[in-house]
Image (spheres, rainbow, N blue to C red):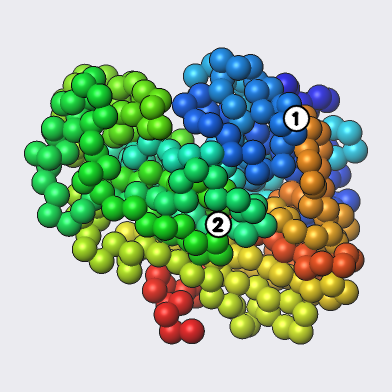
Amino acid sequence: MVAENVVKGDNVAKILAQALDAGEGLLRLTPTWVPRSFLHPGRRIKLFPGDLYAYGANRGGIDERWFGSTTEAANEGRVWHEGLSFCSFEGQNFLLRDAVSEAGGRIIGDAMFKKYNKWPVYSKFFDNMGPIPHHMHQRFEDAKLVGQEGKPESYYFPPQYNNVDNNFCYTFMGLEPGTTKDQLRKCLENWDKGDNGILDLSKAYRLKRGSGWLIPPGVLHAPGSLCTYEPQWGSDVFGMFQNIVEGRYVPWSLLVKDMPLEKHRDLDFIIGQLDWEKNVDPTFKDNNYLEPIVDEAASGPGYTDRWIVYGTVDGEQLFSAKELTVEPGAKCTLQDPGSSGWITVQGKGRIGKLALQTPAMIRFGQATEDEVYITHEAATRGVEVENTGSEPLVSLRYFGPGVHGKLPKVGDYKQK
């Protein structure tokens, strides 16, 4: 399960320099698979079915693939590299996290490296047969109480990975306007008495392929069963507020795992970790729903670049994402103001000197040609993308904080 031929820590300088020079600032990444013990894999992220339990049945099925990640998965019994992306070059592998530590300026840019001293975001596919428990991710000030960081996140539902709906193509988000804290408190008090009824206090939204959502920290959500591309802050904190999902019991420990130990039975404290006003917002969809917006300045004959994740969280541009489509036989020069993690979701071609091929099936531990990290130096210089296949070449790429000088606002899609 551990990547072979791993170059660790302070020893990455030489191979990193060679990889950056050979790839002209592009790094090849290998698939990063993450299991979740409390969820049921949706079987759409191309992993060979016989490998779904490659970490062991006790760890649960693999339902997530993480992209450009320097964030560890917060799973019990995790392997040492769980959640971390590996770069691959000439048969050797090294962590993207170590690469950023070694050459942060070249990889994520001097400004970002100076401010964060790391790549502070990541993205993933999460893919489940049914819904996830209604849960929230802590705000930054609350996560700090346990030495963690908060976790705003976003969703995009790529059509290429959603040939079927699976069991529940709806997501509960927030709480119905007018819901009281006493009503939510009763749900927590009834944790061991059967279904605690929290979904009775919420609203489900039907999920639409090719659309998305922006979810601030402290907001309850129960993601549905579409395979989801999820740019987010580099943290894995959460608190589950729903105790039974599709007949599966969720232990209290998953509600309080990222809260101070002395607060694990303090219901007022637990409820206080929610951003109450955002949860009961009567215009929740208007303030959080996203439709793609074509970036006319970055599009041209034979290629279209679309914003798929945009807007700010509490006034800050923390992450964003775009979808690039290049038609057969076409090429373009991609030039961004900052680094990004790239995943190919359809077609074949090349980016710079690196081949691109969307796999039909991936064995656990197998390398692929669909994932790339575009470093700051390559992004700002410009890199050529060419479609060498017979169908559209489609990719998703996500960016870190403060990269774009001009970013659409939530709701701007209505003006198109």
Residue 151, position as x, y percentages in the image? 41, 44
Marks 2/1: CA–CA distance: 24 Å
Mark 2 neighbour class, 10 Å CA radius: few under 14, some 14 to 19, many 20 or more:
many
Q: Could you tell me which secondary element the residue under label 2 belongs to? A: loop
Q: Quadrant of the N terminus?
A: top right
Neighbours of disc 1 within 10 Å: few (<14), some (14-19), many (20+): many
Indicate whether 354 appears above or below 246.
Answer: below
| Residue assigned mark 1 | 364
Residue 345 is tagged as none
**Amino acid beneath label 2:** Phe
Residue position for label 2: 157
Relative to 399, does residue 269 appear above or below in the rendering? above
Location of residue 64 with respect to 227 vertically, above or below: above
Residue at x 24%, y 39% (from the top left corner): 198
Q: Type of residue at label 1?
A: Phe
Q: Residue at the spot x=74%, y=49% of the render?
A: 371
